[in-house]
Amino acid sequence: METLQEPAVASAAAPALAEPLVSVRKLTMAFGPQVIQRDLDFDILPGEVLAIAGGSGCGKSTLLRHLIGLQAPAAGQVLYGDRDLYAADAAEQRKLMQTFGVTFQAGALWSSMTVGENVMLPMQLFTDMGPEQCEHEARFKLALVGLGGSFDAEPATLSGGMKKRAAIARALALNPPLVFLDEPSAGLDPLASAHLDELILHLRNNLNTTVVMVSHELESIFTVADRLLFLDAESKTMTALGPPHELRHSGPEGVQTFLRRGATTAQEITA
Ligand SMILES: Nc1ncnc2c1ncn2[C@@H]1O[C@H](COP(=O)(O)OP(=O)(O)OP(=O)(O)O)[C@@H](O)[C@H]1O
Ligand SMILES: [Mg+2]
């Protein structure tokens, strides 16, 4: 007797698109009555490097603060999966905030602690790892960013590039699937900047880390970014989202101008 076979729908079906790690919906950011950006709508996709660019003062760092739970939206939502970061209770918010690492624009290592102590701090605060395990893990993270010999160094003795790398090692302390980096290569010499780009690519390619990076360094954007989100200072909203190589040729005029010559101020972009 013949048995009916199930049609092979599973293999014939289109591959499921990866769920976004973070979805930003109709986000308006403001300080009191002063709107900085409005109607931001984009996803952060797993495994991508997403660069955020735009003229100086257009709201890039402010957007990062919204993404990491430090500044509540004037309107709209920041969703981690289906959880609204700002509607979550304190316990859930704390849990969501442990799923990402952050480096701030100014670097911000604790100067009263050694580099190693800086990297161990999140482990001591948020895990039950013992001291030896913390040290082992911190040394591993420092080696990953090329600072294997700096565990006992004081932050003040590090160069600008080394401080940025140490801050990234600390952001990686809890092995987050997602990191936010604010201007990681600003102020670095070209060699240090290129090393940082290599590190970011290593994070994405080998550790499958999703990276959201504010940057106005064209070299860096074209080397590491899968997509670029452009915030426009004049219209106070996003004007482009896509692969930088494509936007360079087919993006809005201001974005093309930025990507062709690296204009960083609103005046230059609209000139
Ligand atoms: N705490 C604050 N109170 C009021 N306004 C602020 C505050 N922080 C930032 N701003 C304003 O918000 C706007 C966006 O600032 P933000 O630092 O996000 O810009 P940015 O794009 O990161 O600039 P840059 O390229 O210089 O780093 C600026 O006009 C700034 O003056
Ligand atoms: Mg900034």
Image (spheres, rainbow, N blue to C red):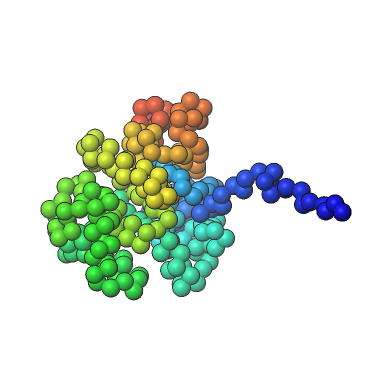
- The residue lying toward the viewer, choosing from 7 and 196, is 7
Residue 31 on image: x %, y %: 42, 56
At 18% from the left and 64% from the top, the residue drawn is 113
At 33% from the left and 33% from the top, the residue drawn is 219
Residue 84 on image: x %, y %: 54, 62
From this view, report whether residue 225 is shown above or below residue 180. Answer: above
Q: Is residue 39 visible?
A: no
- The residue lying toward the viewer, choosing from 3 and 64, is 3
At 26% from the left and 57% from the top, the residue drawn is 140
Q: Is residue 202 visible?
A: yes
At 23% from the left and 65% from the top, the residue drawn is 135
Is 148 left or right of 262, judged from the image as shown? left
- The residue lying toward the viewer, choosing from 138 and 78, is 138
Quarter of the image containing the N terminus? Answer: bottom right
Quarter of the image containing the C terminus? Answer: top left
Is 97 left or right of 199, judged from the image as shown? right
Residue 186 on image: x %, y %: 28, 42
Residue that sits furthest to the left in the current view: 157
Residue 130 on image: x %, y %: 28, 73
Residue that sits furthest to the front in the current view: 1
From this view, report whether residue 214 is shown above or below residue 92. Answer: above
